[in-house]
Image (cartoon, helix red, strand yellow):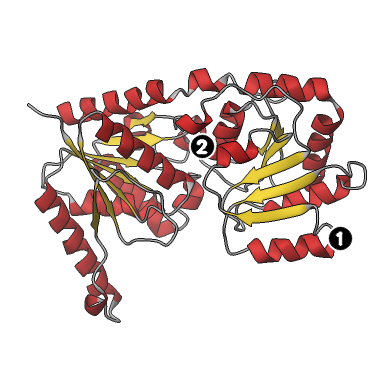
Amino acid sequence: MGKKHIAMFISTLNKGGSERVLVNLAEYFYSRGYRVTIVTQYRAENEYRISRGIRRVFSELPEDEIGENRIANFAGRFLRLRGIWKKERPDLILSFIGKNNMMALLTSRMLRIPVVISVRGEPKEEYYSAALRLAARVLFPLADGIVLQSRGSRKFFGPAVRKKAVILPNSIHPAFMRKPYEGEREKRIVAVGRVDANKNHRMIIKAFAALAEKYPEYELVIYGEGELRQDLIRQAAEMGLADRVHLPGSISDVAEAIYKASVFVLSSNSEGMPNTLIEAMALGLPCISTDCPCGGPAELISHGKNGLLTEVDNWKELKENLQKILKDQECAEKLGRNAAKIQKKLNPDLINKKWEAYFCQTMGK
């Protein structure tokens, strides 16, 4: 008997952390001989590429079928997605993020297809309203499998979900599995991620501005696209740092761009298990991260040993942590050396096999 058919459901393949994890999983299972179908609502402008052998199906209604009646639109989307499951008949459905998890569970009822749902971010943010939290409490116990990213995220859910849930970490993308840089590091502080309010890059700019005069040879580079990019460029200019704070947008080879940097900073208000932090640590960069509520960064960083943690939205503490690294080369080298040990813990071969074993167990039920 051949390999099983796995369908993966997410809104788009737009360049973001959750989308990247899903694409990485799709590529892994495809390389292992599984049939893989990715179901998205629509195609976004800036998406991850997938192998030609991985099928792509769209669940959004055609424009001429979308009306002003929201209930009718929901019913149409519901029936269209259920029709996809009926036609594709996958052996397992994996769903990522928020309302997608609800839709996957509802549209696959009575079809005898195992469904694994995954909460990718801070649960309080992903299920932000009373209605969504109630729906999660009612629907999640119906899932055949539930994947969470951190121990802290378990606390958000009731006993029925906690009992069923497993924690499966994100693997390191192969591009970041390389020997840490050992030469003199470039005088750059770097950040990577969508340029939006949650990523709170303003916090990094404020901290950098407070140190700019003391460390005139350093620059700050924030890689990523988002609605606040032009606002941050203006903020830097108003602080007199237009020539030292750069926002070049999205780039194709993040690993190469940040490989020789002096410091990596994650400044988010909330995160699940941040890929960018995992990848920067794997490269051996000295890393600073906000201590986000559900505990993802704190499960990666042991403060003072393999990185530094900073209180959320506390730019003054971030400034102090940046200064610790910039002024103390021995400290910076120790943090980077210990951070790189994450390569062993989150090796893609190891982690992907855990996902595969979990899927096989779920399908076997």
Q: Nearer the viewer, residue 112 or 264?
A: 264
Residue ID at (10%, 29%) = 2
In the current view of this chain or complex, which residue is farthest to the left?
1
Residue 363 drawn at (x, y percent): 18, 31
Q: What residue would you read off at disc 1?
A: 240
Q: Secondary structure at mark 1?
A: loop
Residue ID at (80%, 40%) = 317
Horizontal side of 10 relative to 199 (left or right) equals: left
Horizontal side of 117 relative to 119 (left or right) equals: left
Q: Amino acid at mark 1?
A: Gly
Residue 172 visible in image = no
Q: Nearer the viewer, residue 197 or 172?
A: 172
Picture quadrant of residue 330: top right
Residue 180 drawn at (x, y percent): 62, 23
Tell me: residue 320, above or below residue 52: above
Residue 164 drawn at (x, y percent): 31, 31
Question: Which disc number belongs to residue 145?
Answer: none
The earlier-in-sequence mark between 1 and 2 is 1
Tell me: residue 70, above or below residue 296: below
Q: Amino acid at mark 2?
A: Met
Q: What residue would you read off at disc 2?
A: 273
In the current view of this chain or complex, which residue is farthest to the bottom?
68
Q: Secondary structure at mark 2?
A: loop
Picture quadrant of residue 145: top left
Query: Are the two marked residues, 1 and 2, in contact with CB atoms closer than 8 angstroms?
Result: no
Residue 329 visible in image = yes
Picture quadrant of residue 248: bottom right
Tell me: residue 178, above or below residue 86: above
